[in-house]
């Protein structure tokens, strides 16, 4: 009996006569080659989650507004993966029964008839996630980033969402909590990555209350003390990544004074400003997100459920910013125009692949 332990920690045992040296050598090399191939694929999966590895279309407000626009998540997923999906969450208490639960909603008034995140998000992505888990990691995980925008930070609400994430733990990227929050633990990458916001109340529930061996399933954004256009990237982003806080969320007005409505023409100076912000984030170990880059005629904005404050006025102006954000390496580019932005990212990725060949 001979035993061989490969790099992937799989032990192989087999019988062969010692005199069959050639067969033995060939078998050993075959097993070692398989082990190295598995290790290489695992490395690719981790690299896709690295800050700066890729730009992802972030589907802004990807949920129904009351009875309207219930197809948003279908549109976002149809645009292809990787994709980010924003879910706004509110806490509803039934006045008759006193029972409370989390719902997907843009805000008050909350009626209790809104969908739950389990139904609207997790049930909808189930076929994608289960297929990905069955096929194995081909280097493009996480496929879906779930971006949580809480409309309140009630402890019971946050605890309910934490319990829901725990239920779907096998789908969700995680890191061990550990003992020192300043030590960024290695991310175990799975098909879904969950991001949440800046508030300390969220850190309390999603991180501080965990034991050292518990998994961190939702990662918060760093605090930003000054979001003025004139502030330097070092002032705006003064925090490095921690084991819990791993991303940086920004309104577009830190790039262009006055934001989308007062942006004017895109210039080399603005492109330099954008790149400096991105480089600062990545140097601090953070993913960076900008919201929300839309372009449409003013009279057509409200009928789509978009916000005028996020509107550059037309598609060409928005497209210039999309291209600049992709070129600068922005990790998450939020927009309501899911299909157009996703196509812009695909074209850019294709062009980069062609140029590198």
Image (cartoon, grey):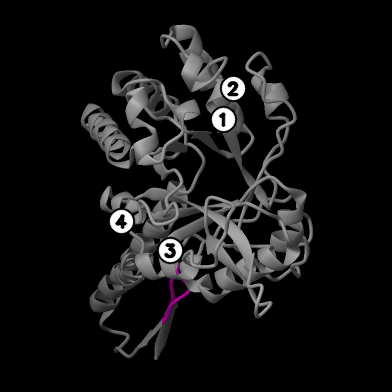
Q: To which quarter of the image does residue 40 belong? A: bottom left
| Residues marked 3 and 2 touching at CB (< 8 Å) | no
What whole-number distance in Å separates the C-alpha atoms at marks 1 and 4? 26 Å
Counting residues from the start of the chain, the first of labels 4 and 3 encountered is 4
Q: Secondary structure at mark 3?
A: helix
Question: Residue at coordinates 59% horizontally, 56% vertically from top-left?
Answer: 186
Proximity of marks 4 and 2: CB atoms separated by less than 8 Å: no
Q: Quadrant of residue 142?
A: bottom left
Could you tell which of marks 1 and 4 lies nearer the N-terminus? 4
Task: Say which residue label 1 marks.
Answer: 251
Question: Alpha-carbon distance for marks 4 and 3?
Answer: 10 Å
Write down the residue under mark 3.
121
Q: Earlier in the sequence, mark 1 or mark 3?
A: 3
Please state the horizontal and vertical placement of residue 27, each as a whole percent of the image.
Answer: 28, 75
- The residue where tag 4 is placed is 74
Q: In the image, is 207 to the left or to the right of 300?
A: right
- Judged from this view, the residue extending furthest toward the front is 96
Q: Is residue 134 left or right of residue 178?
A: left
Labels 2 & 1 near each other (Cβ < 8 A):
yes
99 versus 113 height, above or below: below
Q: Which residues are magenta?
A: 5-11
How far apart marks 2 and 1 lie (CA) works out to 6 Å
Q: Element type at marker 2? A: helix
Residue 16: percent from the left, percent from the top? Answer: 30, 88
């Amino acid at each position: 009996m001979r035993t061989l332990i490969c790099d992937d920690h799989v032990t192989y045992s087999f019988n062969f006569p010692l005199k069959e040296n050639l067969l033995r050598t060939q078998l050993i090399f075959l097993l070692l080659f398989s082990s190295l191939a598995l290790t290489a694929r695992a490395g690719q999966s981790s690299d896709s989650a690295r800050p700066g590895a890729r730009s992802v279309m972030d589907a802004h407000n990807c949920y129904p507004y009351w009875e309207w626009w219930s197809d948003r998540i279908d549109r976002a997923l149809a645009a292809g993966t990787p994709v980010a999906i924003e879910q706004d969450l509110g806490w509803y208490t039934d006045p008759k029964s006193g029972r409370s639960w989390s719902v997907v909603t843009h805000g008050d008034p909350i009626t209790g008839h809104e969908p739950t995140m389990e139904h609207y998000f997790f049930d909808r992505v189930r076929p994608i996630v289960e297929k990905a888990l069955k096929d194995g990691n081909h280097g493009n995980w996480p496929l879906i980033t779930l971006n949580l925008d809480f409309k309140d930070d009630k402890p019971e609400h946050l605890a309910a969402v934490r319990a829901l994430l725990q239920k779907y733990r096998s789908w969700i990227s995680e890191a061990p909590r550990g003992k020192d929050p300043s030590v960024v633990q290695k991310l175990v990458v799975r098909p879904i990555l969950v991001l949440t916001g800046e508030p300390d109340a969220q850190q309390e529930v999603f991180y501080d209350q965990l034991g050292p061996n518990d998994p961190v399933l939702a990662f918060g954004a760093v605090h930003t003390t000054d979001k003025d256009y004139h502030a330097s990237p070092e002032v705006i982003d003064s925090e490095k990544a921690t084991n819990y806080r791993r991303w940086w969320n920004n309104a577009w007005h830190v790039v262009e004074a006055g934001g989308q409505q007062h942006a004017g023409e895109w210039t080399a100076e603005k492109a330099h400003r954008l790149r400096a912000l991105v480089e600062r984030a990545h140097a601090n170990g953070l993913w960076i997100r900008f919201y929300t880059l839309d372009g449409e005629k003013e009279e057509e904005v409200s009928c789509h459920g978009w916000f005028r404050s996020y509107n550059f006025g037309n598609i060409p102006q928005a497209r210039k910013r999309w291209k600049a954000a992709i070129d600068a390496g922005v990790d998450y580019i939020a927009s309501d125009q899911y299909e157009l932005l996703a196509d812009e990212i695909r074209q850019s990725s294709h062009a980069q692949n062609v140029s590198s060949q």
